[in-house]
Amino acid sequence: MSMIDDVWVNAKSAAESVGKKAGKVLDRSKLRLAIMDVKAELSKQYRVLGKLCYEAYKTGKDYTTGRQSLLEHIAELNKQLDALRDMLANSEKKVKCSSCGTYNPPKALFCSKCGARLIVKSSGEEDLSQQELLDFAETILDEEEL
Ligand SMILES: [Zn+2]
Protein backbone atom coordinates (compact mmCIF):
# COMPACT_ATOMS: atom_id res chain seq x y z
CA MET A 1 0.00 0.00 0.00
CA SER A 2 1.50 3.32 -1.03
CA MET A 3 1.55 6.52 1.02
CA ILE A 4 -1.17 7.96 -1.19
CA ASP A 5 -3.49 4.97 -0.65
CA ASP A 6 -3.00 5.37 3.07
CA VAL A 7 -3.87 9.07 3.00
CA TRP A 8 -6.89 8.32 0.92
CA VAL A 9 -8.25 5.62 3.27
CA ASN A 10 -7.85 7.94 6.28
CA ALA A 11 -9.53 10.83 4.50
CA LYS A 12 -12.37 8.56 3.43
CA SER A 13 -13.17 7.36 6.93
CA ALA A 14 -13.09 10.96 8.17
CA ALA A 15 -15.55 11.93 5.46
CA GLU A 16 -17.83 9.06 6.40
CA SER A 17 -18.06 10.28 9.98
CA VAL A 18 -18.83 13.77 8.66
CA GLY A 19 -21.62 12.21 6.61
CA LYS A 20 -23.08 10.48 9.66
CA LYS A 21 -22.96 13.73 11.60
CA ALA A 22 -24.70 15.56 8.76
CA GLY A 23 -27.61 13.12 8.88
CA LYS A 24 -28.38 14.12 12.44
CA VAL A 25 -28.17 17.90 12.13
CA LEU A 26 -31.27 19.66 13.32
CA ASP A 27 -30.49 23.30 13.83
CA ARG A 28 -28.71 26.03 11.92
CA SER A 29 -25.58 26.21 14.02
CA LYS A 30 -25.09 22.48 13.60
CA LEU A 31 -25.76 22.84 9.88
CA ARG A 32 -23.13 25.56 9.65
CA LEU A 33 -20.66 23.39 11.53
CA ALA A 34 -21.42 20.45 9.26
CA ILE A 35 -20.91 22.67 6.20
CA MET A 36 -17.55 23.78 7.59
CA ASP A 37 -16.62 20.15 8.22
CA VAL A 38 -17.48 19.06 4.70
CA LYS A 39 -15.66 22.10 3.25
CA ALA A 40 -12.54 21.25 5.28
CA GLU A 41 -12.81 17.65 4.16
CA LEU A 42 -13.17 18.77 0.55
CA SER A 43 -10.06 20.93 0.61
CA LYS A 44 -8.19 18.01 2.18
CA GLN A 45 -9.38 15.75 -0.63
CA TYR A 46 -8.33 18.28 -3.25
CA ARG A 47 -4.86 18.29 -1.69
CA VAL A 48 -4.80 14.48 -1.77
CA LEU A 49 -5.76 14.64 -5.43
CA GLY A 50 -2.89 17.04 -6.06
CA LYS A 51 -0.45 14.77 -4.23
CA LEU A 52 -1.72 11.78 -6.16
CA CYS A 53 -1.21 13.64 -9.40
CA TYR A 54 2.33 14.64 -8.47
CA GLU A 55 3.18 11.17 -7.22
CA ALA A 56 2.03 9.74 -10.55
CA TYR A 57 4.22 12.25 -12.39
CA LYS A 58 7.25 11.60 -10.18
CA THR A 59 7.13 7.81 -10.15
CA GLY A 60 5.60 7.30 -13.57
CA LYS A 61 3.16 4.83 -12.00
CA ASP A 62 -0.44 4.51 -13.07
CA TYR A 63 -2.81 5.90 -10.45
CA THR A 64 -5.93 5.89 -12.62
CA THR A 65 -7.90 3.59 -10.28
CA GLY A 66 -7.05 5.55 -7.16
CA ARG A 67 -7.75 8.81 -8.91
CA GLN A 68 -11.13 7.62 -10.14
CA SER A 69 -12.36 6.63 -6.68
CA LEU A 70 -10.96 9.84 -5.23
CA LEU A 71 -12.84 11.89 -7.82
CA GLU A 72 -16.04 9.98 -7.08
CA HIS A 73 -15.48 10.62 -3.40
CA ILE A 74 -15.00 14.36 -4.04
CA ALA A 75 -18.19 14.41 -6.12
CA GLU A 76 -20.01 12.73 -3.22
CA LEU A 77 -18.69 15.34 -0.78
CA ASN A 78 -19.82 18.14 -3.09
CA LYS A 79 -23.27 16.56 -3.22
CA GLN A 80 -23.30 16.46 0.58
CA LEU A 81 -22.25 20.10 0.71
CA ASP A 82 -25.07 21.10 -1.65
CA ALA A 83 -27.60 19.18 0.41
CA LEU A 84 -26.40 20.84 3.63
CA ARG A 85 -26.54 24.28 2.02
CA ASP A 86 -30.08 23.55 0.84
CA MET A 87 -31.08 22.50 4.35
CA LEU A 88 -29.58 25.66 5.83
CA ALA A 89 -31.23 27.88 3.23
CA ASN A 90 -34.56 26.14 3.84
CA SER A 91 -34.30 26.69 7.56
CA GLU A 92 -33.64 30.36 6.87
CA LYS A 93 -36.59 30.39 4.46
CA LYS A 94 -34.34 31.54 1.66
CA VAL A 95 -35.58 31.06 -1.87
CA LYS A 96 -33.33 29.20 -4.27
CA CYS A 97 -33.32 30.50 -7.83
CA SER A 98 -34.36 27.70 -10.16
CA SER A 99 -32.30 29.10 -13.01
CA CYS A 100 -28.92 29.93 -11.40
CA GLY A 101 -29.10 28.36 -7.91
CA THR A 102 -28.48 31.58 -5.96
CA TYR A 103 -30.14 31.83 -2.54
CA ASN A 104 -32.31 34.92 -2.15
CA PRO A 105 -33.91 36.56 0.91
CA PRO A 106 -37.25 35.05 2.06
CA LYS A 107 -39.61 37.49 0.39
CA ALA A 108 -37.63 38.26 -2.78
CA LEU A 109 -39.64 38.07 -5.99
CA PHE A 110 -36.71 38.11 -8.40
CA CYS A 111 -33.23 36.59 -8.22
CA SER A 112 -30.61 39.09 -7.08
CA LYS A 113 -28.04 37.53 -9.41
CA CYS A 114 -29.75 36.63 -12.67
CA GLY A 115 -33.10 38.44 -12.33
CA ALA A 116 -35.23 35.34 -12.89
CA ARG A 117 -38.67 35.30 -11.26
CA LEU A 118 -38.61 33.29 -8.05
CA ILE A 119 -41.23 30.70 -7.29
CA VAL A 120 -42.08 30.90 -3.60
CA LYS A 121 -43.20 27.56 -2.24
CA SER A 122 -45.67 27.62 0.62
CA SER A 123 -44.04 25.99 3.60
CA GLY A 124 -45.46 22.86 5.19
CA GLU A 125 -46.49 22.60 8.82
CA GLU A 126 -43.43 20.60 9.74
CA ASP A 127 -41.27 23.40 8.41
CA LEU A 128 -43.09 25.97 10.46
CA SER A 129 -42.79 24.14 13.75
CA GLN A 130 -39.09 23.61 13.15
CA GLN A 131 -38.78 27.32 12.45
CA GLU A 132 -40.60 28.14 15.68
CA LEU A 133 -38.29 25.81 17.54
CA LEU A 134 -35.25 27.53 16.04
CA ASP A 135 -36.59 30.98 16.92
CA PHE A 136 -37.21 29.78 20.44
CA ALA A 137 -33.66 28.43 20.68
CA GLU A 138 -32.33 31.76 19.44
CA THR A 139 -34.35 33.66 22.06
CA ILE A 140 -32.78 31.54 24.76
CA LEU A 141 -29.30 32.12 23.33
CA ASP A 142 -29.91 35.88 23.16
CA GLU A 143 -30.96 35.96 26.80
CA GLU A 144 -27.81 34.12 27.84
CA GLU A 145 -25.67 36.77 26.24
CA LEU A 146 -27.20 39.59 28.30
ZN1 LIG B 1 -30.86 33.41 -10.46
Image (tube, rainbow, N blue to C red):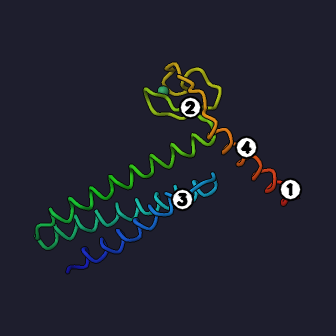
Amino acid beneath label 1: Glu
Q: Give whichever of discs 4 and 3 has the lower sequence position.
A: 3
Element at label 2: strand
Mark 2 or 4: in front is: 4
How far apart in space, not on screen, are marks 1 and 4 (Cα)? Answer: 17 Å
Disc 3 crowd, CA 10 A, few/some/many (<14, 14-19, 20+): few
Q: Label 4: which residue?
A: 132
**The one of 47 and 94 positioned closer to us in this rendering:** 94
Name the residue beneath numbered marker 1: 143
| SS assignment at label 3 | helix
Callout 1 secondary element: helix
Q: Residues within 10 Å of mark 1 (few under 14, many from 20)?
A: few
Residue occupying image coordinates x 79% and y 56%: 141
Residue 98 in the image: state x and y as whole percent.
Answer: 45, 27
Residue at numbered disc 2? 95
Label 4 – label 3 distance at C-alpha: 19 Å
Q: Which residue is mark 3?
A: 24
Name the kind of residue labelled 3 in the image: Lys
* Separation of residues labelled 2 and 1 (CA atoms): 29 Å
